Amino acid sequence: MQAVDTIILGAGPTGLSAAHRLIELGQSSFVVFERESEAGGLCRSRLVDGSPLDIGGGHFLDVRRPAVLEWLVRFLPRASWREYDRISTIQVHGTQIDYPFEANLWQLPIERQLDYLESIARAGCVTGAAMPSGFREWITWKLGDRIAADYMLPYNEKIWSMDLSRLGTYWLHKLPSVSFRETLRSCLERKPSGTMPAHAKFLYPVEGGYGRVWEIMGRALGERLLLGRAPRSLDVETLTIDGEYRARRIVTTLPWPELARIAALPSAIREQIGRLEHAAVEVAYRRENLDSTAHWIYVPDPAVPHHRLLLRHNFVPGARGHWTETNARRAGGASGWRHVNEYAYPLNTLAKPTAVQAVTSWAAGKGIVAAGRWGEWEHMNSDVAVEAGWRAAERAVAAG
Ligand SMILES: Cc1cc2nc3c(=O)[nH]c(=O)nc-3n(C[C@H](O)[C@H](O)[C@H](O)COP(=O)(O)OP(=O)(O)OC[C@H]3O[C@@H](n4cnc5c(N)ncnc54)[C@H](O)[C@@H]3O)c2cc1C
């Protein structure tokens, strides 16, 4: 039996950041268990048709968290990243308009602009109607029935592939309000209005794809990173893994059903884990370049299985081709290289907040810190996952 202070489960961005934060805090007694043969989780890249492809889907580093950037460039120097001004579009009415839809109506023919403007004027958030608690109803309340029907409803039905009324709205509070006046102004002035979306500027590695930085972080852990090693059992009373490693505390970044597979848990906790839902995404490569300068394109058309196109030739230097992202429930027709990410999106169902609260507070009582996209069951981007990893390491150390 090996005794260590901390065991970290999972070497995605959260687990890797927790491990390196432990080192910064002067802690050297830890191991990281990772099921795959390489570190990086959803942020990994592979060489496909001669160039890197992000196997977890299109990944871009937002430039808005200076502390995270400063930290990541210690592993992959700033000169090894290229900065891009985001170009992303939405395919509608046989054309493409810039994202976000409501800020770029001015790019459509006048008659369509008028239809959308009328419908925004009737939207609940403009007329002062109470905000609904279900996501499906919220979409129309927020954007009006026309944008809902032509874009937001079909797009969300594709990406989540579930009854949208079962999703909550608690995760949407950060989105800016749609203003009829501002939308009208943007149509009259023929330029975008409102707050710019995430990733307005983003960084992407010049070589190796988005996975490069996480691969380097993994390598820097040396023998403390156990690759190709999925734990077979976890004793939550003694914090022992496989009867071989015993820890004073555990940081878990695993999807909770993975933990439930290997640990004897109280039935109430197992029941709450059963309420946590997720979506799987298939990434499939195609060799052709697309005739667009966009980095990625949203595809709401219900007749097409994929919901997003990633134009690799526009952000991976020297690369050709593009890839599609498709909810695994709608996928299956792609030929050629493809990869299914079983755990891609945690679903923000109405039941989720209570379930996460119950499971994570039970875990905390056992000395298990839950962190990251799956520990917290949150749609967090990798820069936020880095911070989640730091916090988890700090909490683990503070717990003694
Ligand atoms: C389609 C898509 C697009 C995205 N785009 C962006 C973007 O543009 N920019 C951005 O910053 N973020 C983006 N993200 C989010 C980003 O992927 C996550 O924030 C990040 O990967 C979360 O890191 P994590 O370590 O919490 O989880 P993960 O990356 O999922 O890592 C979890 C790790 O646990 C391991 N694991 C699972 N089960 C076991 C087990 N039983 N035993 C041992 N190990 C196990 C996994 O192999 C994995 O390495 C996107 C995500 C998706 C799905």
Image (cartoon, rainbow, N blue to C red):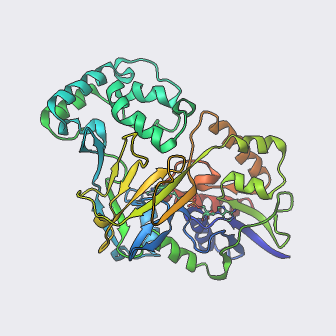
Residue, far bottom: 222
Quarter of the image where ligand 1 sits: bottom right
Q: Residue at x 57, y 65 (%)?
A: 12
Q: Position of residue 329 (x, y in %)?
A: 54, 47
In the image, residue 291 above or below residue 20: above
Q: Position of residue 126 (x, y in %)?
A: 34, 22
Q: Position of residue 234 (x, y in %)?
A: 81, 62
Tell me the quarter of the picture where residue 286 sits: bottom left
For this rendering, which residue is in front, 283 or 85?
283
Q: Residue at x 38, y 74 (%)?
A: 51
Q: Is residue 386 left or right of residue 50?
A: right
Q: Quadrant of the N terminus?
A: bottom right
Q: Is residue 138 left or right of residue 105?
A: right
Q: Residue at x 45, y 39 (%)?
A: 156
Q: Quadrant of the C terminus?
A: bottom right
Q: Could you tell me if residue 174 is visible in this image?
A: no
Tell me the quarter of the picture where residue 248 sits: bottom right
Q: Is residue 293 left or right of residue 387?
A: left
Q: Residue at x 55, y 58 (%)?
A: 341
Give the number of callouts: 0
Q: Could you tell me if residue 242 is visible in this image?
A: yes
For this rendering, which residue is in front, 361 or 328?
328
For this rendering, which residue is in front, 44 or 149?
149
Q: Position of residue 129 (x, y in %)?
A: 42, 17
In the image, residue 83 above or below residue 346: below
Q: Is residue 42 left or right of residue 153?
A: right
